[in-house]
Image: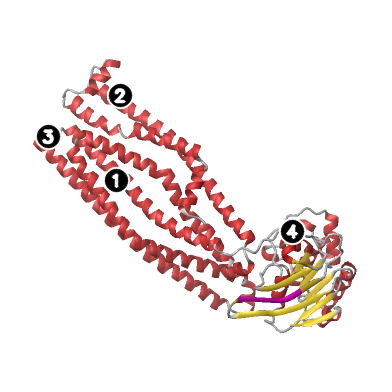
Amino acid sequence: MITFDYLLKQVRLHKRSIVIANIIAVLLTVISVPIPLFIPFLVDEVLLGKEGSFTATVNQFVEVSSAEYYILIVFVLTVIIRAVSVVLSIVRKAYIDQVIEDIRLSMRKKILAHLRDVSMSEYDILGSGAVSSKMTTDIASVMKFLSGSIGNITVQVLTLIGISIILLYLNWQLALIILVLNPLVIKIFIGAFKKVSKMMKERNKAISSFTNSLTESLELFNQIRVQNREVHFTDTVNADAKDIRDRSYEFQLSSNRTMSISRVLLRYSNDLFKAIAVYLVFLGDMSIGEMLAIFVYAGMVMPPIHMIIKFVQDYHDAKEGMDRLNDILRLSIEAKYEMKIDPFRDSKTASIELKDVTFAYDENKMVLKDFNLNVYAGEKVAITGETGSGKSTLANILMGLYPINSGEIFYNGVEAKEIGYKKIREHIGFVLQAPLMFNATLRYNLSLGEEYSDEEMLEVLKIAQLYDFVNELPEKLDTIVGKNGTKLSGGQRQRLSIARVLLDKPKVIIFDESTSSLDTKTEDKLLNALDEYIKDKTVITIAHRQTTIDKADRVVKL
């Protein structure tokens, strides 16, 4: 799980960069915080002519004949110190940014590694839109907090410490006022923001819902347009968008109110601080130069305190963000079984046997109960049945995508747990009814990242009756197919999916109504071309078309 302990462990992996960044932070504090002390020196010693250590120190190094030179020296020193501070800040930020981006990458890898093994039945319920929303919005919230904690909070705390020391040096009684009042303001703010953080959680839920509905609507936009459902779906998305508006408004209103009140309280303490300083000058207990310096330092206290308050807000945002990211990590992973026996080795194909298999999406929806099926090696079996009878679910079960509740599945007489699903998927091809395509080339959509020669690809395209179509394209295999294959017809996408599976040379093939978008003539050509390829292979076909059913050795009705 992603927790604050997890983040701390990630930070410790970059100990060297963090140490260097903190050393630079100390140097920044040491050289930048004392700058306002030049003010009392200039006012009291140079303008008012009082005795002090500043002019004496300068005169040890250079002989100064007039007040203008003291002012010029202070100006030059200030310019040099600020220039060095800028350089140090840039170097420090570079170290911090590298750490932050490394941890961001680590988090994404952790979530993607979990998604790689997650149970498909649970992933399908969560939805891709929700996952993408969490991996952008919520990771950004966590990184914002982390950037503040290791990037800014150290500098701000050190700055406050440095300012406090100087204020205590200038006038310890006056310093106690601001050093007591400001922490009280922070405490009040922390208590108020607990309520704000709950609103932030509701806002992020609304964003997730909006992203999910928007993603699904855009992916199915063609279907929506064909059936004149644009108004309904845009109203649905608009309703989610309105929910985001309402939640965001409530969150921003409460957050701004809390921040504004805290700022007013800080300004009140600051005003009180200045008023007392003026009164001390009136009494003669403080010089004008010291008063001006204290005014400057009182103003310097405000930004670090605001940053600390913002840090508290970021902490609560990150806490909620991590909880939402853990929704992904809480998804059950599919069972992992090490391969002990490879039943596919030295075999052209495989038999499949299901014994007392039971599967349910949940306790209220039983799909298969005590199901038995024996498919002999090399047999062609057609699975038929009404919609909802479990045909596609059976295919997902055979591929190990949906974990069964009870029962056993055997391949060449070896139980699936002895084989491992990774090995099973190496040798079983699954052709989907509605295949998905990447917005990439035909070559990539065929290979999915594996290395195949053009000859191998063209060979399976011939079987899938796509060779002539691809060969006539100007870019041939390097043609971009568009998002989800929009540049291809439904039948072409199905045939490309068939070619994609054949390219892996599976020993068992499962067709899930994979020719439903083909015309009869093209289907006949495809099936005839497939006959030679699959003659020695076990084939399970989920089918409605009679032409497909007629080619089967046996028909099983669910």
> Which residue, given by chain and number where applicable, does mark 3 sit on?
285
Task: Please state if 478 lies on the left or on the right of 115 as rendered.
Answer: right
* Measured Cα–Cα span from mark 3 to mark 2: 29 Å
The percent coordinates of residue 322 (x first, y second) are: 48, 58
Q: Residues within 10 Å of mark 1 (few under 14, many from 20)?
A: some
Task: Please state if 438 lies on the left or on the right of 457 as rendered.
Answer: left
* Measured Cα–Cα span from mark 1 to mark 2: 29 Å
Query: In the depicted view, which residue is nearer to us: 442 or 146?
Result: 146
Dot 1 and dot 2 residues touching (CB under 8 Å):
no
> Which residue, given by chain and number where applicable, does mark 1 sit on?
302
- Which quadrant would residue 298 be assigned to in this image? top left
Task: Please state if 24 lies on the left or on the right of 309 as rendered.
Answer: right
Dot 3 and dot 2 residues touching (CB under 8 Å):
no
Mark whose residue sits in front, 1 or 2: 1
Nearest to N terminus: mark 3 or mark 2: 2
Q: Residue at x 83, y 55 (%)?
A: 454
356 magenta-colored: yes
Mark number displayed over residue 339: 4
Nearest to N terminus: mark 4 or mark 1: 1
Q: Amino acid at mark 2?
A: Ile
The percent coordinates of residue 79 (x first, y second) are: 35, 30
> Which residue, given by chain and number where applicable, does mark 2 sit on?
73
What is the magenta range?
A: 354-361
Q: Amino acid at mark 1?
A: Met
Mark whose residue sits in front, 4 or 3: 4
